Image (spheres, rainbow, N blue to C red):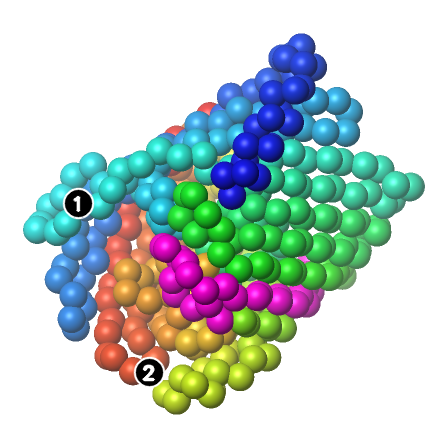
Amino acid sequence: MEKFMFRVLIALSAIPSAAIASDLDVFGNMILRYEHESQHNNLPNRERLRLIARLGLKGDINQHWSVQGRLSTGLKNKQNVPAITIAKFNTQPQPDNDVYVERLFMIGKFNLGKSSQAQLHIGKIPWQSKQVTDIFWDRNLHPIGVHLNYQFNEQHQLQFASLKPLDGNSDVIGLMHIMQWNMSYDLEGIKLRISPWLVDYHGQQGASYAKKDTELDNRSIRLSTSVDYKGFKLGVDVGHSLESFSQFDQFNDQKTSLAVQFSQGTLKQVGNYAWHIRYLRVERFGVINEFAQNGTGRFVTSNLQGVDIRLRRKMNHNWWLGARVSDIKTIKGKDEQGVRLRIEGQYQF
């Protein structure tokens, strides 16, 4: 990873400053969050005040290429945890408080015909494929690699990615290939999106930090689909692993993941509300444990089931307030459960 980032930095430094100075933008956001986790079987309650702060730069190189980088607070060796703890209200360990390069990448955009175009991301990139939820991949993680979007027309898009997931801040672990076909239709006011995709993850031994199943190969077939009518959306993310996990007797048949979400609203205008109600059932190998969403519970990212409810309101042009409750328990094995309450606000510029 260090060698790759060094090469990217050298390439970016070779860009004449005048080429991007006229289009250079500063952007970022801050999230202040009260978080209370309770009702566990084996874990103590945890109550704290947390902060996420991000600051970035982006600019155009020419008519086809742009560049973007962003710093973030968080745990640099566990980058799906972008929050730092600024106050504790009960006895609990103090986690690390780091600042690191969260993303650094280039974007190429090319028109290929009347209605077709291509977009290429290269570097330490945000997750680009289309899902209703983060059940498979936590979007706070920014792998290193390439991602190609090929838009054939308004209805059809092909996405391909070759990615090296992160093992903390200083290395990578395994290799992941993704192919997704996105189909979008508007049927008399009903918006339908269907996105089948294939994931091929090649595991690697010897992780320093990302140790949860990253040594195991895991190929899966997946489907993300949604129906939107008058702003109300019903979405489903489902996946099933094609691998054999016979060495894990208790979990060898636990290979499916499912998220069903009912939602409404956006935060585009002041006064807008946005909410979702989500049901989750994620079996042990239905996702790759290390890279799956950790926003709903502290004790697992797979082998879980439960509900997640979120409500936000756009207060003015730059900020929103919201609350989120997740009630999660394990499916098999060690019996654990927990309720996570979050009250938060985000300021964005």
Closer to us: 166 or 284: 166
* Above or below, 225 relative to 281: above
- Quarter of the figure with residue 305: bottom left
Q: Element at badge 1? A: loop
Q: Position of residue 274 (x, y in %)?
A: 46, 49
> On screen, 106 above or below 326?
above
Q: Label 2: how many residues lie within 10 Å, few (<14), some (14-19) or many (20+)?
A: some
How would you rate the neighbour count of disc 1 (Cα within 10 Å): few for under 14, some for 14-19, many for 20 or more?
Answer: few
The answer to whether residue 241 is left or right of residue 157 is left
- Compared across the picture, whether 14 is left or right of 79 comes to right
Residue type at mark 1 is Gln
Give the residue drawn at x 44%, y 27%.
55
Camera-side residue of 290 and 276: 290
Q: Amino acid at mark 2?
A: Lys
Q: Which residue is at the front of the view, 11 or 58?
A: 11
Q: Is residue 205 magenta?
A: yes
Examine the rendering and report whether any part of residue 348 can be seen.
no
Foreground tag (1 vs 2): 1
Query: Which residue is nearer to you in this view: 7 or 137?
Result: 7
1 or 2: tag closer to the N-terminus: 1
Question: Residue 75, position in %: x, y?
Answer: 33, 44
Could you tell me which residue is drawn at 70 percent across and 55 percent down? Answer: 160
Residue 98 in view of the camera: yes
Region of the chain picked out in magenta, as a range? 190-216
Q: Residue at x 52, y 66 (%)?
A: 203
> SS class of the residue under badge 2?
loop
Q: Which residue is mark 1?
A: 94
Q: Is residue 339 left or right of residue 275?
A: left
Q: Which residue is mark 2?
A: 332
Q: Is 276 one of the magenta-colored residues?
A: no
Which quarter of the figure has residue 97? top left
Q: CA distance from mark 1 to mark 2?
A: 30 Å
